[in-house]
Image (cartoon, grey):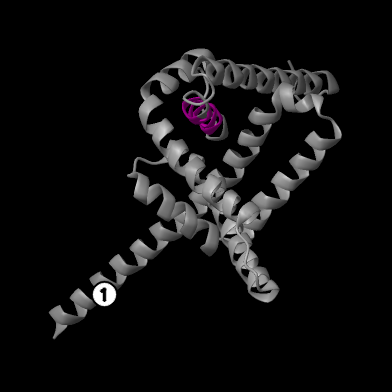
Amino acid sequence: MNSDSWIGKFYQFGEAVLFLLYVNFLWIVFSCIGLILFGLGPSTVAMFTVFRKWVMGEQGYHIGKLFWQTYRKEFLRANGITWITGLFGLMLLTNLQYFSLSDPIWNLIVKGVFLFFAFLFFIMVVYLFPLYVHYQNSFQQYFKNAFLIAIYQPLRTIYALAALFTLYYLLATFPIFIFLFGGSLTSMVVMYITYVTFVKIEYKQKRIEEQLEEESKTKKREWSYE
């Protein structure tokens, strides 16, 4: 079918909607299979894995099979990183809600510090799951790299935050979308933005390595002339 025609574009749009609906359905079902508490982490990792392949342009894979294989394979590690993230987030939220000082000025300062750390935590989490499905690292490296990318790629981070707030407005305006493809649409957008960020970082690192290698070769030639 000609994708340039309006019928072709409508067909592609329908495929995209069905894709989002199906992945969101799998995410909910597999989260429930793990009783939410133990299913949300591996289900989210499986969802990001599906969208990583989509972003990278890979085709010919069975979505349901890939989802199940990733869910089963990453069950323990995904739960580990999710629980660590959740507990730290719960600590921040608890301190924001219940921690208070008698001095109003100091109380305001401390609340501001907690809010600042909560913001840093949030932007770190934006990169955490995409990093998890894209690279093989230790838990410590995932958290460290997520934080560093969020800080040292401010424009990309702002771009991601703007997209997330736009999605939040859309889902708040039409709550039915939350159940239909709230999780899948959010993870697809996040995976797309973060993947582009990873590619840019890898390209810059490659350029730096090439420059260093070229400088090293130049120095060797200079030494050989001497």
Inspect this view and state whether residue 202 appears.
no
User: Number of marks in the image?
Assistant: 1
Residue 128, how many percent across, how many down?
49, 45
Give the residue at x 85% y 23%: 6
Q: Which of 156 and 209 is in front in this view?
A: 156
Camera-side residue of 221 and 136: 136
Q: In which quarter of the image is residue 90?
A: top right
Which of the two residues, 91 or 42, is positioned nearer the viewer here?
91
Image quadrant in which the C terminus is located: bottom left
Residue 46 is inside the magenta segment: yes
What secondary structure predominates along the stretch shown in magenta?
A: helix
Magenta-drawn segment: 41-52
- At x 66%, y 74%, the residue is 103
Instruction: Tell me if residue 186 comes above or below residue 158 in the rendering.
Output: above
Determine crowd level at label 1: few under 14, some 14-19, many 20+ residues with C-alpha closer than 10 A: few
> Residue 164, relative to residue 208: is it above or below?
above
Q: Mark 1 points at which residue?
A: 218
User: Please, is residue 115 above or below residue 30 in the view?
Assistant: below
Residue sticking out furthest to the front: 102
Kindly tell me whether residue 33 is visible in this rendering.
yes
Residue 132 magenta-drawn? no
Q: Determine whether, in the image, residue 150 is placed left or right of residue 83.
A: right
Which amino acid lies under the numbered mark 1 shown in the image of this protein? Thr
